[in-house]
């Protein structure tokens, strides 16, 4: 069965970035990061989730952190140079990113938001992020993800 490419994959193709694709069954409704890591047979410290936040300035920021980790909002605010930071309400994610919860890729959002990769990803050979659709993940190098998203590395987890 041919897999349709997501917007994130088309962007990587256009930039000639190598990546792998992993799919998983989501019929059971388990789309949280730890469940996804289990389903694709990858260690949770190699699978990253994409979190969307809003700073005190009302600017939108994107944080890519390990699925088992928790975003430290104080560290996130400091990295972004904001007074404070809060998670974007779930209902607003699609409006701002074009993606839905569980299928939010750091690549190919409606706009290019300032993006931060947790520094834990810096030394990995490869990492896994959402391809922009529930049930599809992409495997790529942290350096490639950093380059495509123009991300900054920062310590942003608890």
Image (cartoon, grey):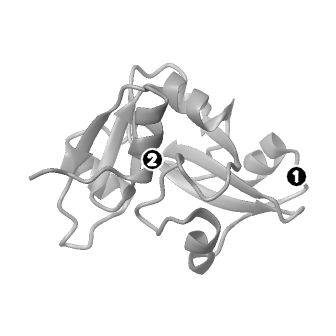
Residue 94, placed above or below residue 117: below
Residue projecting furthest to the front:
14
Instruction: Tell me the residue at 33%/62% (across/down).
Output: 134
Please tell me which of labels 1 and 2 falls first in the chain: 2
Instruction: Tell me the residue at 87%/63% (across/down).
Output: 56
* SS label for mark 1: loop
* x and y, in percent, of residue 1 in the image: 8, 53
Q: Residue 60 occupies which quadrant of the picture?
A: bottom right
Residue 92, placed above or below residue 49: below
Front residue (pair 101, 86): 101
Badge 2 local density, few (<14 within 10 Å), some, or many (20+)? many
Disc 1 and disc 2: Cα gap in Å? Answer: 28 Å
* SS label for mark 2: helix
Give the number of callouts: 2
* x and y, in percent, of residue 114 in the image: 73, 45
Residue of label 2 = 8
Residue projecting furthest to the bottom:
91
Instruction: Tell me the residue at 75%/45% (across/down).
Output: 75
Front residue (pair 152, 21): 21
| Pointer 1 with pointer 2, Cβ within 8 A | no
* x and y, in percent, of residue 127 in the image: 40, 32
Badge 1 local density, few (<14 within 10 Å), some, or many (20+)? some
Residue projecting furthest to the left:
1
Residue 33, placed above or below residue 124: below
Q: Is residue 45 left or right of residue 28?
A: right
Q: Is residue 143 left or right of residue 43?
A: right
* x and y, in percent, of residue 30 in the image: 27, 67
Q: Which mark lies nearer to you, 1 or 2?
A: 2
Residue of label 1 = 82
Instruction: Tell me the residue at 50%/19% (across/down).
Output: 123
């Amino acid at each position: 069965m041919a897999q349709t490419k997501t917007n994130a994959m088309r962007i990587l193709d256009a930039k000639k970035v190598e990546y792998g694709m992993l799919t998983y069954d989501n019929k059971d409704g388990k789309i949280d990061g730890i469940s996804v890591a289990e389903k694709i047979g990858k260690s949770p410290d190699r699978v990253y989730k994409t979190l969307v936040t809003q700073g005190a300035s009302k600017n939108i920021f994107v944080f890519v952190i390990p699925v088992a980790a928790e975003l430290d909002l104080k560290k996130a605010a400091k990295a972004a140079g904001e007074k404070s930071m809060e998670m974007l309400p779930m209902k607003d994610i699609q409006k701002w990113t074009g993606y839905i919860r569980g299928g939010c890729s750091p690549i190919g959002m409606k706009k290019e938001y300032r993006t931060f990769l947790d520094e834990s990803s810096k030394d990995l050979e490869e990492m896994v992020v959402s391809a922009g659709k529930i049930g599809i993940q992409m495997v790529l190098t942290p350096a490639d993800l950093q380059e495509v998203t123009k991300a900054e590395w920062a310590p942003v987890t608890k």
